[in-house]
Amino acid sequence: ALHHPIVRFRTFFRIVYFLPVLTSIVVVALMFGLIYDKDVGVINWVLSLVGIEPVYWLGETWGKMTIDTLIVWRWAGYLSLYFLAGLQAIPHDLYDSAEVDGANAWQKFSNVTIPMLRPIIIFVTFTVLIGSSQIFEEPYVLTSGGPQDTTLSIAMELYREGLSLLNFGYACAISVALFAVAFCVSWTQIRLLGMFRED
């Protein structure tokens, strides 16, 4: 829908996909709170119509899944921009040549699109890996890491130990570990992209 030339309202779809990135996390948290609230949430209201008991979506069992849903919804549009740029950079002659050779839609996708998007796939994968270690706003606003630290992220633990409990040594150790992980992931990404060579 974002790239195909015959899809109408492509600009509208692109705006809709990217809009969550521009939305304030407070507004997003309030919206998800109304959706997932145990007593007045939209999802539990729908479930009650079919006789299902209310679910505590922000509790120990479903809390992580709820926050993961919010994170995916909020950042999918941002990551899709990279894939859109990669798709637009693929020469259309490659698809024409594949079609002349008798390739079907799946063969064009697997033999042309995926290989040409390999650098984008690697970049986005490692960007997500690094970003997953820096998750803070979503669980902090929705659950504050609770209940019983079941939705506590590494970045929230760093914040709590350093600024709330004043355990500066432990907080520094966490930050150094995060830096080391980010460095290793970035170095691996550069190696896979062929931008760095060992001496």
Image: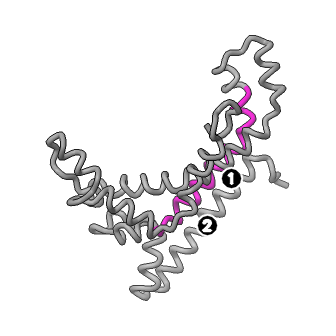
Q: Position of residue 106 (x, y in %)?
A: 63, 21
Residue 132 falls inside the magenta stretch: yes
The type of residue carrying mark 1 is Thr
Left-right relation of 49 to 64: left
Residue under the image location 37 percent in, 67 percent down: 142
- The chief SS type of the magenta part is helix
Q: Position of residue 188 (x, y in %)?
A: 68, 53
Report the quarter where the C terminus lies: bottom right
Residue under the image location 69 percent in, 43 percent down: 84
Q: Secondary structure at mark 1?
A: helix
Q: Position of residue 126 (x, y in %)?
A: 62, 52
Residue 84 falls inside the magenta stretch: no
Separation of marks 2 and 1 at Cα, in angstroms: 12 Å
| Residue situated furthest front in the rendering | 9
Residue that mark 2 sits on: 180
Residue that mark 1 sits on: 188
Residue under the image location 32 percent in, 63 percent down: 150
The disc, 2 or 1, on the residue closer to the chain's N-terminal end is 2
Q: Position of residue 172 (x, y in %)?
A: 53, 80
In the depicted view, which residue is nearer to us: 6 or 130?
A: 6
- Asked where in the image residue 177 lies, by quadrant, the reply is bottom right
Left-right relation of 129 to 183: left
Q: Is residue 48 above or below residue 171?
A: above
